[in-house]
Amino acid sequence: MVTTRTDIEAFSVKLAESPEELQAAQRLRYEVFVAELGGGGALVDHQQRLERDRFDPYFDHMILTQNATGRVVGVYRVLRSEGAAAAGGFYSEGEYDLAPLKSSGRRLLELGRSCLHPAYRGGLAMHYLWQALAAYVARHRIEVLFGVASFHGTDARALAQPLSLLHHQYLAPCELRVRALDKSFQDMNLVDDVDLDRKAAMTQVPSLIKAYLRLGGCVGEGAFVDHAFNTTDVCLILDTRLMTTRQKQRYDPHGRAP
């Protein structure tokens, strides 16, 4: 367990170890992805207010708990190659062709379902989850992190500036460049590079995506329009080998990746 304290609040981050802890994670996911953002899915339980899918049994689920109340206020789920083999593939393979990553010979970790309770956004809570993630990455000697991250909504025209910014400035190198599946492929090259308003475009990029870009992250080719979840997804890729010491310290003062 990784425990981090401040003068005001005390948090603990751990991997869910019981059905009750997993349900606490799924309940927060329901609040954020379903109730707040309008998502859905075949296994969502609206009666118990649980956002879940068939991959949950194969992921490790990090939960951030406010110690004073025992309330789960943040979650992150992570999947190593061993878990993906048992699940029949990575979650992201429903949206992207992951052949470049899977054939790379690198140790992979898929990230997903990252969210915080609204009351804890914009503060230090996410930093505590990332510290725990850094320790997890070091423990399992992970080399490449990846996963889909979302823009709210499915109207590509409204997202033309930020998607084009990602395409022109943050496209992954060829050896790691995954591609959105044809069934819902959305070209991200919607605005010419010379016509981009970079400042305005970056303000539309969700904070989680911006955080990974600051760490040297890049994106796959094309976005995936997920109508069931009411999102437009991009695939983020982070090669820990290319991170600078300063970038690593954004996650962890001890310099551990991710």
Image (cartoon, grey):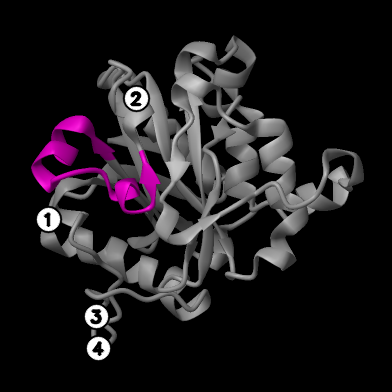
Q: Is there a contact, CB below 8 Å, between mark 3 and mark 2? A: no
Residue at horizontal 72%, vertical 66%? 157
Q: Is residue 152 visible?
A: yes
**Measuring 59% from the left and 66% from the top, which residue is drawn there?**
152
Q: Secondary structure at mark 4?
A: loop
Q: Are marks 4 and 3 in contact (CB under 8 Å)?
A: yes
Give the SS element for disc 3.
loop
Mark identifier at residue 45 = 3
Which residue is found at the position 9% from the left and 42% from the top? 86
- On residue 137, which mark appears? 2
In the image, what residue type sits under mark 2? Val
First of labels 4, 2 by sequence position? 4
Magenta span of residues: 79-97
The residue wearing badge 4 is 47
Q: Is 191 on the left or on the right of 235, as rendered?
A: right
Q: Real-space Cα distance between discs 4 and 2? A: 36 Å
Q: Residue 175's spot in the image, x, y percent? A: 46, 20
